[in-house]
Image: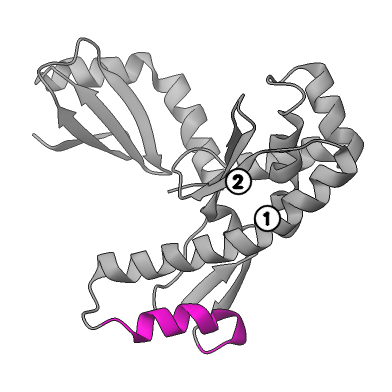
């Protein structure tokens, strides 16, 4: 039993006998993921009924989300705009793809990931230096990597890490993440003082934060 249907939704089941509890997650606007040690369909359906209000709420959030998707090899998503592969903005990505000897899905995705990382190193370093100077906050290092659930992070050692997927969203949202992580150099929390500091350099930061939450990272 790998899947079942609950109301109008597909439920993907992942069985693991070592699990002590059953976990429910939302994969997309019409797909539910259940990780469980139970093989009882009745048990799973009863659990879904018990959590139905939470499930409906999360599914509605998924519908409201903006997905960062594109047609691989045909276009590239850059700063919230989609460009065809023959556009100037896609030059370096096009060159990477043309050098592939074997066009496997994994290698194509690796070309995209490398393109976004290279773009992030240039663009994000400039924006971080700009805001660090006007905010009077110094960092020690910037790292760039593709992440599944976070736009960025800032460690107590003053190391800022940015998600390279940021290159797919609006530049004003990117600036919000930059200022957000720099503000953590002064406040390693999400206190009122922290949000006030972010707002002082980016008026309307609450709205920007809300927009970021509506973008689905895959």
Q: Is 140 situated left or right of 138 in this image?
A: left
Q: Is residue 95 magenta?
A: yes
The residue stretch that appears in magenta: 86-100
Taking depth in this image into account, of 205 and 119 the one nearest to the observer is: 119
- Mark 2 crowd level (few <14, some 14–19, many ≥20, 10 Å Cα): some
| Secondary element type, mark 1 | helix
At a point 59% along the width and 59% down the height, the residue shown is: 121
- Mark 1 crowd level (few <14, some 14–19, many ≥20, 10 Å Cα): some
Q: Earlier in the sequence, mark 1 or mark 2?
A: 1
At a point 51% along the width and 47% down the height, the residue shown is: 216
Q: Which mark is residue 159?
A: none
Residue 33 percent location from the top left of the image: 29, 33
Circles 1 and 2: CB atoms closer than 8 Å: yes
Residue 63 percent location from the top left of the image: 52, 45
Q: Is residue 21 magenta?
A: no
Q: Which residue is disc 2 drawn over?
A: 142
Q: Which residue is disc 1 drawn over?
A: 125
| Secondary element type, mark 2 | strand
At a point 47% along the width and 77% down the height, the residue shown is: 93
The number of numbered badges drawn on the structure is: 2
190 up-or-down from 64: above or below = above
At a point 26% along the width and 28% down the height, the residue shown is: 34
64 up-or-down from 188: above or below = below
> Is residue 156 among the parts visible in the rendering?
yes
Quadrant into which the N terminus falls = top left
> Is residue 74 among the parts visible in the rendering?
no
Which residue reaches farthest bottom? 86
Colouring convention used in this rendered image of the protein: one colour
Residue 108 percent location from the top left of the image: 33, 71
- Picture quadrant of residue 190: top right
């Amino acid at each position: 039993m790998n899947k079942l249907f609950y109301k109008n939704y597909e439920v993907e089941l992942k069985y693991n006998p070592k699990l002590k509890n059953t976990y429910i997650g939302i994969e997309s606007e019409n797909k539910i993921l259940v990780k469980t040690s139970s093989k009882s369909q009745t048990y799973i359906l009863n659990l879904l009924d018990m959590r139905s209000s939470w499930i409906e709420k999360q599914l509605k959030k998924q519908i409201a989300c903006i997905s960062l998707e594109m047609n691989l090899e045909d276009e590239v998503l850059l700063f919230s705009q989609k460009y065809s592969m023959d556009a100037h903005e896609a030059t370096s990505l096009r060159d990477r793809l043309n050098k592939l000897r074997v066009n496997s899905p994994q290698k194509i995705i690796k070309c995209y990931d490398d393109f976004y990382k290279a773009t992030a190193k240039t663009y994000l370093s400039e924006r971080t230096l700009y805001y660090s100077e006007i905010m009077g906050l110094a960092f020690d290092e910037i790292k760039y990597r593709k992440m599944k659930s976070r736009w960025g992070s800032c460690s107590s050692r003053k190391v800022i890490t940015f998600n390279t997927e940021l290159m797919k969203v609006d530049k004003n949202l990117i600036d919000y993440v930059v200022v957000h992580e720099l503000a953590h150099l002064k406040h390693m929390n999400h206190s009122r003082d922290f949000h006030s500091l972010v707002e002082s350099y980016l008026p309307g930061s609450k709205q920007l934060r809300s927009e970021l939450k509506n973008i689905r990272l895959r």
